[in-house]
């Protein structure tokens, strides 16, 4: 009997492609679920999107803008799918995909004990983990990217320059709720949710708590990004022009007097003193109160400044957010693999 | 070649050692039984050997020096964990296909004919198999990998007597026909006599007894005699464990092979494996470990503490 280890002391690893069948077989229900969900939603978006685009085509082609006929067409476009127009309804989608694919990936193995089977097969524990994570991450990211192409198409009418002149809704492509549906960012958020889920799974080791933790962590991160982070990706522009384009993302507005900061919003006492409200029915009907106040303050030497992010920065912002999300996801996946490698049963 | 070789191996969970200063060499070609009470560290030792855990101290190698958990080690070892985990939502055929994809070797014909013999339908979901069928499926998947070492953690604990018998028959056939070395843990001592030819007894995280079963049995005997003369007689003996009754006393004695005649009124019997294991389990201080010249003549040295 040979006392030395035989020549297979360093065996050649098994080919990666074997994990494709393994991963599909074990996750086909979850993957089919995602496909059905996204497919169903895609059909819906396509159907309502065609109507929206049709209504927009009629409204934007109408001349002269503001005429009674055009107003009817404009309002029929405006009133369409208002529940979708702020984009918030799509926000949970990346989180759900990530949580339901990512979190059970390792948590189920650890919860049911099947990791003792999986990690003692000839494929090797680290390679098994790497292959599964990469395959599933790629799949969900690609699916999300495809869906996001459809969403980009759907929302396109709202971002067209010149909507304001035709009395049509103009939305900023940088607005929270819309920015992260389009470009590369929707897919990047889905990848991040998946990575958060995988890490939560290996840390918590139970499926349902890991899914819940993933949703909570994702919501916190998405909220923080939308509220605090995104507006600072590039230094905001400041303008004295009161007519900031409707597709720009307005961050804040304030008043100055003699290049000194005066106030954010005019105090009531000041307004009563220098700009008493006009007598009722004095002005034309479409002359709003804020226009009146603004013009009055301007006459008294105040200047209104607006800081904003122009719509033209959309792709810069997309690349910045996509990059940090990708880096975060790779980091989380790396940590997950490291934890699996050093985890003791 | 040693299928498992541990030196100074230890595993700590938080502040407590589940396994401590474990030095052990199990030669190839045996059905080795790892015995000990619950919490003795059996599962810990097996998990370290198959690479599911990393040791806190010392080292463990398998199959003649391969690091535990390395790809080469995983290739040569098949492990069936406690409660035989299977993917419950997969069919038997899927489990076969899965195992084939995850391993270099997979004897599809062998496992299919085995499952056919056992009446386990390929299309049934693993969750819908009986406990005995699940255990058989896990075992035959492991054997189909054509391992050099088969490691079983409490394989029969959850099985009824018939399933238990069938399971062990499969293991013994593989060991006898294909020369697979087997290491199995169990706290069911009665099973061992029929099965094991190598014994490792763990107690409180330490190796207490290790050796070839024939050697161990040859080195021990039971001596029975009147309680009144017990103390006087036992002075010259290496008593592992004494069981005193009103009239009679039973000594399990280490003889190191010598068969000295017993005094008048005393009787000597050969010892059974179960009795031997029980005696050592009752005396955690006693140990029977291979001496420095371990191996060929399996000389045993006793240490009374």
Image (cartoon, coloured by chain):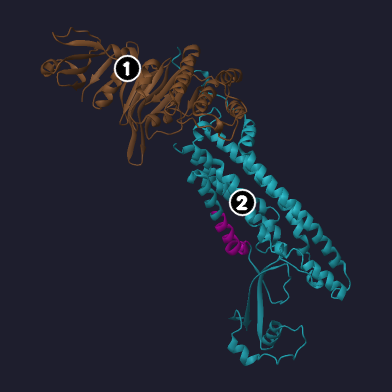
Chain colours: A cyan, B brown
Residue A258 vs B140, above or below: the answer is below
Q: Which mark is residue A150?
A: none
- Snapshot quadrant of residue A270: bottom right
Main secondary-structure element of the magenta-colored stretch: helix
Residue B33 seen from this side: yes
Q: Position of residue B200 (x, y in %)?
A: 35, 22
The residue under the point 32% across, 16% down is B294
Q: How packed is label 1: few (under 14 Cα within 10 Å), some, or many (20 or more)? A: many
**In what element is the residue under mark 1?**
helix
| Residue A227 located within the stretch drawn in magenta | yes
Q: Are marks 1 and 2 in contact (CB under 8 Å)?
A: no
Q: Which residues are magenta?
A: A217-233
Helix, strand or loop at mark 2: helix
Label 1 sits on residue:
B273
Residue B143 picture location, percent across and down: 52, 21
Q: Is residue B255 left or right of residue A97?
A: left
Q: Is residue B196 left or right of residue A40?
A: left
Residue shown at 47% from the left, 17% from the top: B169
- The chain under label 2 reads A
State the image coordinates of residue A216 (x, y, percent, origin top left): 54, 55
Residue B165 position in % (x across, y down): 45, 19
Label 1 marks a residue whose chain is: B
B179 or B118: nearer the viewer: B118
According to the image, label 2 marks what residue?
Answer: A96
Residue that appears at 66% across and 50% down: A187
């Amino acid at each position: 009997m040979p006392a030395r280890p035989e020549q297979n002391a360093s065996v050649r690893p098994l080919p990666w492609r074997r994990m494709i069948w393994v991963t599909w077989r074990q996750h086909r229900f979850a993957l089919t679920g995602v496909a059905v969900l996204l497919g169903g939603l895609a059909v819906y978006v396509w159907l309502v999107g065609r109507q929206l685009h049709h209504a927009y085509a009629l409204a934007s082609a109408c001349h002269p803008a503001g005429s009674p006929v055009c107003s009817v067409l404009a309002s029929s476009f405006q009133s369409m799918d208002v529940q979708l127009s702020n984009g918030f309804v799509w926000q949970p989608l990346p989180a759900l995909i990530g949580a339901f694919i990512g979190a059970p990936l390792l948590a189920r193995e650890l919860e049911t004990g099947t990791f003792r089977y999986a990690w003692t097969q000839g494929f090797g524990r680290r390679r098994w983990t790497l292959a599964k994570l990469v395959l599933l991450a790629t799949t969900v990211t690609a699916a999300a990217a495809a869906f996001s192409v459809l969403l980009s198409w759907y929302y396109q009418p709202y971002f067209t320059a010149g909507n304001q002149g035709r009395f049509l809704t103009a939305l900023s492509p940088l607005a929270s709720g819309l920015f992260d549906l389009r470009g590369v960012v929707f897919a990047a958020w889905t990848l991040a949710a998946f990575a958060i889920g995988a890490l939560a799974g290996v840390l918590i080791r139970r499926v349902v708590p890991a899914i819940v933790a993933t949703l909570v962590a994702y919501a916190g991160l998405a909220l923080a990004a939308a509220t605090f982070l995104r507006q600072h990706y590039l230094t905001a522009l400041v303008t004295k022009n009161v007519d900031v384009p409707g597709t720009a993302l307005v961050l804040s507005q304030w008043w100055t007097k003699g290049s000194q900061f005066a106030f954010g919003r005019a105090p009531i006492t000041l307004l009563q003193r220098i700009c008493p409200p006009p007598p009722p029915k004095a002005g034309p009907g479409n002359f709003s109160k804020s226009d009146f106040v603004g013009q009055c303050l301007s006459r008294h030497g105040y200047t209104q400044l607006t800081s904003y992010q122009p719509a033209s920065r959309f792709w810069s912002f997309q690349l910045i957010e996509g990059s940090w999300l990708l880096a975060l996801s790779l980091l989380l996946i790396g940590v997950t693999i490291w934890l699996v490698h050093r985890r003791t049963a | 070649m040693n299928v498992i070789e541990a030196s100074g191996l230890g595993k700590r969970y938080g502040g407590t050692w589940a396994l401590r200063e474990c030095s052990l060499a199990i030669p190839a070609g045996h059905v080795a039984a790892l015995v000990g009470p619950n919490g003795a560290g059996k599962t810990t030792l097996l998990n370290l050997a198959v690479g599911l855990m990393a040791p806190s101290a010392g080292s463990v190698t398998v199959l003649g020096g391969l690091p535990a958990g390395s790809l080469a080690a995983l290739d040569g070892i098949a492990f069936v964990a406690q409660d035989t985990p299977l993917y419950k939502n997969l069919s038997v055929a899927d489990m076969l296909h899965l195992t084939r994809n995850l391993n270099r070797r997979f004897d599809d014909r062998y496992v299919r004919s085995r499952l056919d013999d056992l009446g386990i339908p390929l299309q049934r979901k693993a969750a819908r198999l009986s406990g005995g069928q699940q255990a058989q499926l896990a075992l035959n998947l492991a054997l189909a990998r054509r391992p050099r070492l088969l490691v079983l953690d409490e394989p029969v604990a959850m099985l009824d007597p018939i399933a238990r018998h069938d399971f062990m028959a499969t293991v013994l056939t593989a060991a006898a026909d294909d020369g697979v070395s087997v290491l199995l843990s169990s706290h069911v001592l009665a099973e061992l006599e029929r099965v094991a030819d190598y014994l490792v007894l763990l107690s409180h995280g330490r190796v207490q007894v290790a050796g070839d079963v024939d050697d161990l049995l040859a080195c021990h005997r039971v001596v029975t005699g009147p309680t009144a003369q017990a103390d006087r007689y036992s002075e010259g003996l290496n008593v592992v464990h004494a069981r005193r009754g009103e009239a009679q006393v039973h000594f399990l004695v280490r003889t190191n092979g010598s068969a000295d005649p017993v005094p008048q009124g005393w009787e000597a019997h050969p010892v059974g494996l179960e009795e031997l294991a029980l005696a050592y389990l009752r005396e955690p201080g006693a140990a029977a470990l291979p001496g420095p010249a371990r191996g060929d003549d399996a000389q045993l040295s006793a240490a009374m503490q």
